[in-house]
Image (cartoon, rainbow, N blue to C red):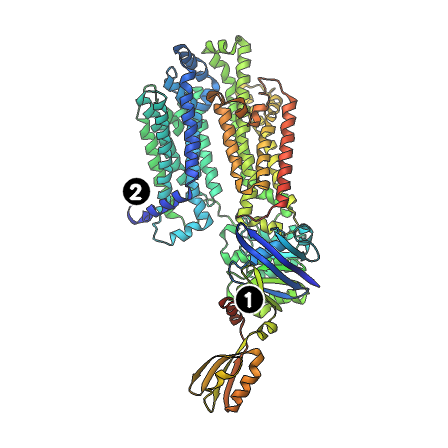
Amino acid sequence: MAVIELHDVVKTFGTTHALDHLDLTVEQGEVHGFLGPNGAGKSTTIRVLLGLLRADSGTATMLGGDPWRDAATLHRRLAYVPGDVSLWPNLSGGEVIDVLARMRGGLDEARRTQMLERFDLDPTKKARTYSKGNRQKVALVAALASRADLYLLDEPTSGLDPLMEAEFQEAVHELKAEGATILLSSHILAEAEALADRISIIRAGRVVQSGTLAELRHLTRTTVIAETERPATAIGTVPGVHEPELHGNRVTFDVDSDHLDAAVNALAALGVRSLAAHPPTLEELFLRQYGEDVTA
Amino acid sequence: MSDSSGSSVTGVGHLLRLVLRRDRVRLPVWMVGLGGTIVASALAVPPLYDTPEKIAGYARTVGASPVSYLMSGRQAGLDTLGGIVANEISQVAQLGVCLMVVFLVVRHTRAEEESGRAELLRSTVLGRHAATFAGLVYGVAAALLIGAITTISMLAAGLPTTGSLTYGTGLALLGVTYTAVTLVAVQLSTSARGALGLAGAAVAVGYLVRGLGAMEDNALVWLSPFGWAQRMDAFGDERWWPVVLLLGSTALLLALAARLMAQRDFGGGLLDTRPGRARAGWQLSTSFGLATRLQRGLLIGWAVGLFLLGLLYGSVIPTIPDLIASNPEMADVVGVGGQAAEVALVDAFLAYIFLFMAVISCGFVVSSVLRLRTEEEAGRTEAVLATPVSRTGWMAATTTLALVAAAKLTVIMGLGLALGYGLGSGEWDRVLPQVAGQLAYLPGTLVVGALAVALYGLLPRGTGLAWAAVALIALQVILGQLLGLPDAVQAISPFWHLAAVPVDDFEILPFVSLLALAAALVAAGLWGYRRRDAVTG
C-alpha cells in the first residue's frame, strides 16, 4: 500500500512553477530518498504533503487521507523535520521538544532521553543561543522522540557533523525496523545511498527518475578500469562503450549496464591482467540527471 | 562617540546606502505620515483662531486645561498664534518623532544582529561600531527631517521665524536624544523586541514625567527630554540653553552605548542570558499555552505599563478643582459654576483619558495578533501546523489570547485609574464607575484587533494595514476636531461611534454593534486562513 501518492501535482507561486506535474509514490515501510538540487521543489512537495500549501491541481493522498482537508487528523500519525529549522528564541531546546511532541499527542519519554543522549544535546539552553547544528538536533529529537507511522525529513542532517550524521543513520535504521515509512529529502547522495530503499530524483518541479538504487543503476553505466596484455585499441567500437581512455595497456571506459557482457568479453579476448569495475555511484547518477538532458 | 573614529566605523557609508535601500518605502511613509500630519495641523490652526479674542480665549481655556497640560505640557506663548499651533501639534509631533527613531534605529541595529544578517555584513570590511554609527546617523537624519518639515510648515502658516526655528530645533533634538537612548537600549537587550520595549518605555517615562510636571507646574519637567525641548519656550521667551541639556545627554548616552558595544560580544547583550528549563511546564501542552508563553513578556510589559499609566492619570484627577479655582474663566467655558463645573471638567478629563488609553491598548492588540505573522515569517508556524493542531486551532488560540488580554488590560487600566484617584483624593468610591467607564471603550479596541485577524487570514502581506488603522485612529482622536475631518472620515474610527462615557450616557447599540463587527472580522480571518497557503513569502 502506498503511504504517499502524488499524481500530476502542480503548484505555482506567481510565475514560478514550483511543482510541475509531479508524481511521487512512497510505499509502506520504505525509506524513500527524495533527491534534488536546491530549488528543485523538495520542500514545496513536503509542504503540500503537510497541508501547508494547497496544490493548484493534481491529486494527493497521504496515509489514506487528503493532506489538505484532513491535515490535523493525519498529523497525529506523522513527524516532521523542517528544512530550515527556526525555533522560538526564548524557549529552551527541551521546552521546544516537549511542546511539539505534546501537540503531536504524546511523547515517548524513554526515546526522548535516548535521543538527547545520542545527539549530545543540552536541553537547557535558550533556542536563540543554539548553533545551526544544535537547532537541527532539537528538530530531530522532537521528531524522532515521537512514535509515528510516517516521518517527513527535509534535509535532516544539514549542519550536523559526521559523528552526528552516523547517529542519525542509526536512528533511521531503527525506525525502519519498527515498520515506519520515511521520506528523506536530501542533496547529500551518500546519505540516500546508505539509507534509501527507493529513490526519486526531482528536477525543476518534476520527478525525472524513480526506482530502487539497482533499477536506477541498471539504466546507467558501469565504470571499468582494466589492464590487458595487448592494448585495447578497439574497445571504443564495442556497442555501449563510452569515453574510452587508453594509456598504454591500461584502459578505462564507461559501459551501458546492458552491454557490460560484450565489453568484458572483448577485454577477455585481449588477455586481462587486472580488472576493476564499479557500479555508478549516486553521484554519477545525479550528475547525469542534471548534467544532460534526460527527457529522452 | 569618542572612540568610534577611524577604522571602527569603516564601511558606514555602505551600510547607510543599504539602510536607505531597505527603507525606501518605510522612511517616506514616516515622513509623509508624521510630517504630513504636522503640516496639516499647523495650517489648520490660523483659520480657526482668526481674531485676537479667540486667541486670548485659547490661552485661558483649552491651553490651560488639565488634559492639555498632561498631554502637551505647558507651552509658552499660548496667547499667540504660534503658541497655539505648537500646543496643538506637540503631542503628535513629539511622541511621533520619538517613536519613529526608536523603530527605525532598532530595525537597523539589534534586529539585524538578532536575525544573523548583520553577521554576514560584519564579516566584510566593516568596523566594530559601524552599525551603531549608521543607526545614529540614520536616526539623527530622520529627526532633523521632521524638525525641518515642522519649521517649514510653521513658516508656511505665517508664524514668526525665530519661534518656528526654535520649535523645530527642539523637536529634532528630542528625536536625536531618543536616538541615543535607543542605541543604549539595543546594547542591553539581545532581542529586537526587548530593545523596542526598553526604548519605548523610556519614551513613555519621559512623556509622562513631563506631563505630570506640567500639570503640577513643578521641576519634574526638567527631568524629561520632552520638558527640555518644550522649555526652549518657542513663541515665548525663546531660550536656547536647553539645547545644551539635549545635546549633552545625547553625548553621554552615546558614550555609554559605545562603551557597552565595546564590551559585549556580537549578538550578546547585558540582559537575557539565563539558561532555560530542560522540560516544558504543563502549561506548554496546547497551542493556547504556547501562544501565551510566546507573548508572556509582551503581556506583562503592557499590563505594567498601562496600569502605571492609569495610576498616573487617576492621581491627577483630584488636582483638577485647583485648576478651576485658579482660572474662573474655565467654569464659564464649561457653562456651569461651582461644584457642577468641577464635575463636568473631571468628566471631560475622564472621557478623554478613557479614550486615549483605549487607543493605546490598540497598539497592544495589534502587536499581539500579528505575532501570528511573525511566527509564520520566521517559519515556526510550520512546525506547529505539522502537528495535529489545526490552522483554526492555532489562529483561534492566538486570537483568543489577544482579545481576552485586551479585555483584561482594559480592566487593569480602569483599576489603575481608580487606585490613582483613590491615592490622590482619599476617596475610594469610584472603582466601579472607572472600570466600567474604561470597559465602555473596549469594543473599539476589539474591532481593531479583529481587523488584524481578518487581514492575517485574508491578506497576509497586508497586515501592516492594521498599524495604519491604529495610526489613523490616533490621528482622529488627537487631531480630528482641529483638522475638521468630515464625519465620513472620522467614522472610520470605531471609537467615534461609541458614547463618550462619562460625559454622555452609555449607549448599548453602538457597543453591541461593534462587538458584532469584531466577531464578523474574526470569522472572516479564520475563514481566509483555512483557505490560503500557510507559508507565504
Checking the image for residue B355, the label placed there is none
Q: Quadrant of the N terminus of chain B?
A: top left
* Mark 1 secondary-structure assignment: loop
Quick one: label 2, few (<14), some, or many (20+) residues within 10 Å?
few
| Residue placed under numbered mark 2 in the picture | B2
Q: Residue at x 35, y 23 (%)?
A: B156
Chain of residue at mark 2: B
**Whether residue A274 is situated above or below residue B522 in the rendered picture:** below
Residue A5: x percent and y percent?
66, 60
Q: Is residue A205 visible?
A: yes
**Whether residue A286 is situated above or below residue B193 in the rendered picture:** below
User: Could you tell whether B437 is left or right of B260 in the image?
Assistant: right
Residue B84: x percent and y percent?
40, 19
- Same subunit, labels 2 and 1: the answer reads no
Chain of residue at mark 1: A
Q: Quadrant of residue B188?
A: top left
* Mark 2 secondary-structure assignment: loop
**Whether residue A6 is situated above or below residue B29 in the rendered picture:** below
Q: Nearer the viewer, residue B30 or B343?
A: B30
Label 2 to label 1: alpha-carbon separation: 66 Å
Quick one: label 1, few (<14), some, or many (20+) residues within 10 Å?
few
Instruction: Please name the amino acid that badge 1 sits on.
Output: Thr
Q: Nearer the viewer, residue A127 or A49?
A: A49
Checking the image for residue A295, the label placed there is 1
Q: Quadrant of residue B154?
A: top left
